[in-house]
Amino acid sequence: MLTKQLRLAIAPAAFGILLLAGPLLVQSGPVQAAEIMPHRALYSMSLGKANGEGGVTGAGGTMAYQWGESCNGWTVEQRYRLKMAYAESADVSISSNFVTWEAKDGLSYRFSQKETRDGGTETEIKGDAKLDGPGKGGKATFEKPDDKSFVLPAGALFPSAHTMMLIDKAKAGENFVSKQVFDGATVENAVLVSAVIGPKVEPDPEAAKKSTLLNRPGWRVRLAFFPADQKAEKPDYELGMLLLDNGVSRDMVIDYGDYAIKATLDDIEPLPKAGC
């Protein structure tokens, strides 16, 4: 799934939506755990909306996303190039590469991010995190930029585990879940992510013509990413997407209030599953 890294990279440096949950719905019977299909996807990014208050007048770029599998873990690579246009300042071009590895038991995580703005200044974030056990806290250490560390809260999840948890909750008929998630995309502790899960969406025959990966049911999911400061009442931003039951996101909208960035799926291909 999309990490917080994308939001911070494309938002203007000078700028930093409450969700209403419906009643909890639970269906009876056993629920199958999420069966993730490794894949590589290419998205085009554009300006979804702009009300003028943020000064954003245009946006365009591409994002390549790869979710791979090994015998003991998940690998994710998210690369994008994006150009943001503003009414009263120069355009900004951003290039970013974010790579992670996450153990299948959900207890270990490594992350590395490199970002360049206008072909000049490059920033790098790199480190690892470990949890002491399922449902327990742990520690995250940043090797770059300043060897900073955080004590992760009990119950925190890493990104792949969080996505699979959302799919499992959706299969169970739940429509609201809130979890602390650590992704290492910014030098901060785990953040609260609240999700509203909509009704089940059946496969779209037209989308399925592109790939068998898209011939799957899914759910409209709306995620609210709150600041690390637990006193904050409103999220930094929201992410809406059509999340399929195999882990594929068919489309995404990253909403900052003043403007939104839309990511549209252009191409997708399967990757080998681990033969273990």
Image (cartoon, rainbow, N blue to C red):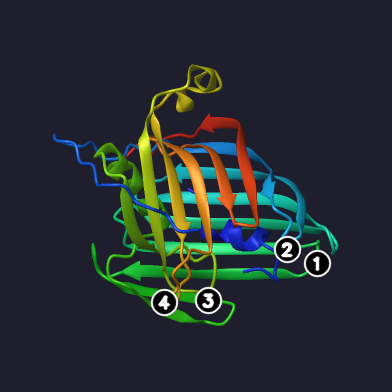
Compared with 171, 183 (above or below) is below
Image point 51% across, 50% down: which residue? 239
> Front-most of 118 and 250?
250
SS type, badge 1: loop
Mark 2–mark 1 distance (CA, rounded to whole Å): 6 Å
SS type, badge 3: strand
Q: Earlier in the sequence, mark 4 or mark 3?
A: 3
The residue labelled by disc 4 is 231
Q: Earlier in the sequence, mark 3 or mark 2?
A: 2
Pinpoint residue 81: horizontal percent, then vertical percent.
71, 50
The residue labelled by disc 3 is 143
Q: Amino acid at mark 4?
A: Lys
Q: Are marks 2 and 1 in contact (CB under 8 Å)?
A: yes
Q: Quadrant of residue 92 in the image?
A: bottom right
Compared with 199, 54 (above or below) is below
SS type, badge 4: loop
Q: Quadrant of residue 180 in the image?
A: bottom left
The residue labelled by disc 1 is 120
User: Badge 3: how crowded within 10 Å, few (<14), some, or many (20+)?
Assistant: some
Q: Earlier in the sequence, mark 4 or mark 2?
A: 2
Q: Earlier in the sequence, mark 4 or mark 1?
A: 1
The residue labelled by disc 2 is 116
